[in-house]
Amino acid sequence: MTASIGNLHRAQRFVAQSRKLLQTRHDGARKTIILGGSSISGQQKQQYRFHHPDPFNPKTTMGWRAALKEAEIPLTKFNQETEEGLRLGLPGASSIDDKTIPTFSRGELPHFAGINTFLKAPYIEDAKAVGAYDCAVVGVPFDGGCTYRAGTRFGPQGIRRISALYTPYNYEKGIDLREQMTLCDIGDVFTIPANIEKTFDQISNAVGHIASNGTMPIILGGDHSIGFPTVRGLASVTTKNIGIIHVDRHADIQEKDLDERMHTTPYFHATNIPNVRPKNLVQIGIGGWQVPRPAVSN
């Protein structure tokens, strides 16, 4: 015990001395460290060249460039949304200094209020109007393809709820989805909880309808079985080849699981579609103890 305490004290003294002896000096993008003391014969100088921008010249940093890029993004759609909010939600109380605040919450703010669409995007009740938008978010609340834990039928609700926390503007990328594209939320596919194949048909119908109108569908699931009908819906409205990038720990290329086309099977069936070739399936991250051997043999 005495020896251990002695070693601890020596270590503490060494750390304290090292802190005093270590001097750091920045000179532009070059960092010089000077080490000196009785344990080192003379003074040793080591120079390190760093590839990050000079911290004393903020105009060379990514943050500065991102700030400059923000100035290039218009506020047209934001101003339109604000005016629409006042028109639909009525002007705020006379005590409110910010005259852009309506009485009834409309649009993005406040994040904790309003009806939860994805990123507070406009909800379109008339599905035939989807072609007016660049992208459409659609929920697929289905977990009938699960072989173990259910619950992903509530996934679209959960994703929309947490998305309300975020804005359409990304600082690092210098983009604002509200200003630079049109996005809507078309609601959820009417899934059939007790029937996988009928649900697949519903999903393919929905995705095909969105894509055929020239709008890019963004799918909120839902268990992984919905991957097949999603791809099938896209393939039904184009003759072009479709590629799949599948990021997962599971292979999801069995033909069947528990005698059905479950969540372990979507990309076996998707790559049997004529314009979705197996060579255009890229899988990333497959591994671990939950990759069924039938998937590997396929």
Image: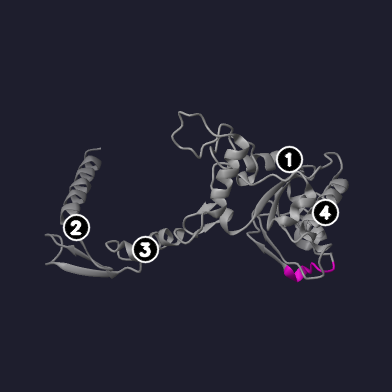
The residue shown at (63%, 59%) is 285
Q: Give the range drawn in magenta.
A: 274-280
Q: Give the label on residue 22, or none.
A: 2
Label 3 to label 1: alpha-carbon separation: 44 Å
The first of marks 2 and 3 along the sequence is: 2
Q: Quadrant of the N terminus?
A: top left
Q: In which quarter of the image is residue 88?
A: top right
Please identify, in this view, whether the residue under mark 3 or under mark 1 is nearer the observer: 3
Q: Does the magenta stretch include residue 134?
A: no
Left or right: residue 29 compared with residue 191: left
Residue position for label 3: 61
Residue 222 can be seen in this image: no
Label 4 to label 2: alpha-carbon separation: 65 Å
Q: Give the label on residue 204, or none.
A: 4
Amino acid at circle 1: Arg
Viewer-side residue, 129 vs 173: 129
Viewer-side residue, 131 vs 256: 131
Report helix, strand or loop for mark 1: helix
> Picture coordinates of residue 56 (x, y %)?
27, 62
> Picture coordinates of residue 158 (x, y %)?
64, 39
